[in-house]
Image (tube, rainbow, N blue to C red):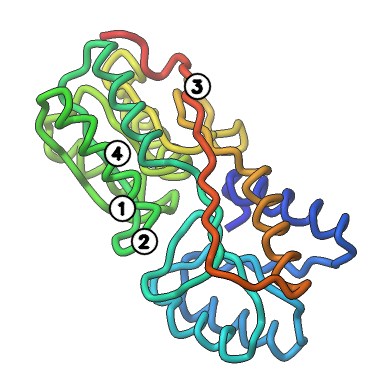
Amino acid sequence: DITNPFFSTLARGVEDAAREAGYPLILGNTDESAAREREHLGALMSHQINGLVIAPTVGSEAHLRRLAQRRIPFVLVDRRVPGVEADLVRGDTEAGAQQLVRHLVEQGYRRIAFVGGTPQLSSLEDRLGGYRAGVREAGLDEEVRLSGYLLESGRETAEALLADGDLPEAVLAANNVVAAGVLAVFRERGVRVPQDVALACVDEAESSLVVGPLLTVVRQPAFEMGRRAMALLADRIGGAAGPPREVVLPTELVVRHSTGGR
């Protein structure tokens, strides 16, 4: 969904690299829907595309195998797909999430909740794995609430936290859109960030999403991820053979007001 700044920046990286390689770009949003993804891929194959860069959703395996059967090269970005062998470009969000937990612990927070994320997606597995490694390292208890990667996912989770009447000291959101939903509900309900609850997330949260305290984030190099994915795809379109390649790019911790020390 390119209303998410991470994916819009990634798509721009793909487009710039595609233009340099002489390819026009067709862009489609799947909104985490396997049915919509299948429709897009059917239309693209009928247009005889040269290749595909895709951030897959849950249930992509059969769709991607159809591409392989048609000998249409494709590159995965941000997410692995079990049982599908293909080139992949992703950020090291497992290390990034662990770094966020360490930062929160250093700021004095002991109850840190992980919220959001779509089960069965490798991006969630990585981020949740980093969170769990971080709380285990600090000797803390886990508090996990999975709800999806959408704005409404963050809103629903924040409402559930408030309904429980026992807010954690800090919240680590699975992505920037979830963080925006959490922050919107906190603002509506008079919960102050960071005075009442600290908030951090994976992926940059731009002003188009967040109004309020500037968020501490672990930022992925989204533009470079797009460029690298297109470079791998152009290589495959040109006939390059060989086993699948994986490019893992480092993340960057950006500390801002939303995690002010306890």
What whole-number distance in Å separates the C-alpha atoms at marks 1 and 3? 22 Å
Q: Which residue is mark 3?
A: 254
Q: Secondary structure at mark 4?
A: helix
Toward the viewer: 254 or 138?
138
What whole-number distance in Å separates the C-alpha atoms at marks 2 and 3? 25 Å
Toward the viewer: 130 or 237?
237
User: Which callout, 2 or 4, points at the residue further toward the start of the chain?
Assistant: 2
Where residue 164 appears, as percent x and y from the top left, is: 12, 38
Q: Which residue is mark 1?
A: 125
Where residue 86 appears, as percent x and y from the top left, is: 53, 69
Asked if the residue at tag 3 contacts the one at tag 4, i.e. Cβ–Cβ closer than 8 Å, the answer is no
Asked if the residue at tag 4 contacts the one at tag 1, i.e. Cβ–Cβ closer than 8 Å, the answer is no
Q: Secondary structure at mark 1?
A: helix
- Residue found farthest to the top: 261
Q: Which residue is mark 4?
A: 130
Q: Which residue is mark 2?
A: 121
Residue 241 lies in quadrant: bottom right
What whole-number distance in Å separates the C-alpha atoms at marks 1 and 4? 9 Å
Q: Residues within 10 Å of mark 3 (few under 14, many from 20)?
A: some
